[in-house]
Image (tube, rainbow, N blue to C red):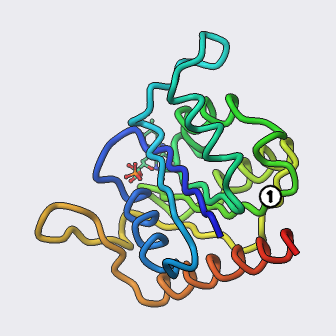
Amino acid sequence: MNILILTGSAFGHSHTEAVADKINELIEKPEHTVDHLMLRTLDMPLFGQGKTDDVELLKRKAEDADAIIIGTPNYHTSYSGILKNALDHLSFDEFSMKPVALFCNSGGMRSTDPLTQLRMVIRGVHGMVIPNQISTTDNDFMKNEVGYYEINDDELIERISNMVDMLIDQAYKCIN
Ligand SMILES: Cc1cc2nc3c(=O)[nH]c(=O)nc-3n(C[C@H](O)[C@H](O)[C@H](O)COP(=O)(O)O)c2cc1C
């Protein structure tokens, strides 16, 4: 399986990217391949304001993926603008009937609001969002010795692993 992770944090060393790293670690290789695009690092103009090589890269990687995992920080009880802008560059071509899994991180209370809103957006491009989802808060992480966040909770890691397994199962069903 070819799995693409998209993350929408505005800042580096983020909690959302730490979850993406954990997901990457949990996915078995070389049976599966994983690409993680940190959208903040891409040259991604506002939709309608032109195209760049990075827009093409995003479209190609999304189209080539058998499954897509999308992670976002909670910004004002929603997903980030960086992510929305990237999704506006994508459409049915990349998402139609493709399994998608979602996760988000909130600074305050644990919240699924950003995920519920993302679920609606992905339905709009005919992606198939699986029921399992992950909602973390800053309290679920600790900083390691090099200043990166790491998940600090085995039960949460188990839940992430279950979400990934369900996504891959679904992706196999879609290609068979
Ligand atoms: C513009 C903005 C809006 C935010 N709004 C919320 C919010 O509504 N609820 C919340 O719990 N945290 C909110 N936060 C805090 C972020 O969710 C928190 O900093 C989180 O750790 C960011 O995730 P990241 O490290 O993956 O980027 C907001 C942060 C920013 C920058």
Q: Which residue lies furthest to the left in this view?
A: 145
Q: Which residue lies furthest to the top in this view?
A: 49
Identify the image quadrant of the C terminus. Answer: bottom right
**Considering depth in this image, is 136 or 123 the residue closer to the camera?**
123
Q: Which residue is at a point 21% across and 68% down the rendered structure image?
A: 143
Q: In this view, does 116 lie above or below 41?
A: below
* Label 1 SS: loop
> Horizontally, is 141 left or right of 81 in the view?
left
**Would you identify the image quadrant in which residue 16 lies?**
bottom left
Number of disc labels: 1
**Considering depth in this image, is 21 or 82 the residue closer to the camera?**
21
Residue beneath label 1, please? 98
Image location of residue 2, percent across then percent down: 62, 64
Tell me: is circle 1 under 8 Å from ligand 1.
no
Q: How crowded is mark 1: few (under 14 residues within 10 Å), some or many (20 or more)?
A: many
Q: Which residue is at a point 38% across and 36% down the rendered structure image?
A: 41
> Horizontally, is 91 left or right of 48 in the view?
right
Image location of residue 39, percent across then percent down: 48, 39
Q: Which residue is at a point 28% across and 65% down the rendered structure image?
A: 149
Q: Is residue 74 above or below residue 175?
A: above
**Considering depth in this image, is 153 or 24 the residue closer to the camera?**
24
Image location of residue 52, percent across then percent down: 53, 20
Q: Residue furthest front?
A: 30
Q: What residue type is labelled 1?
A: Lys
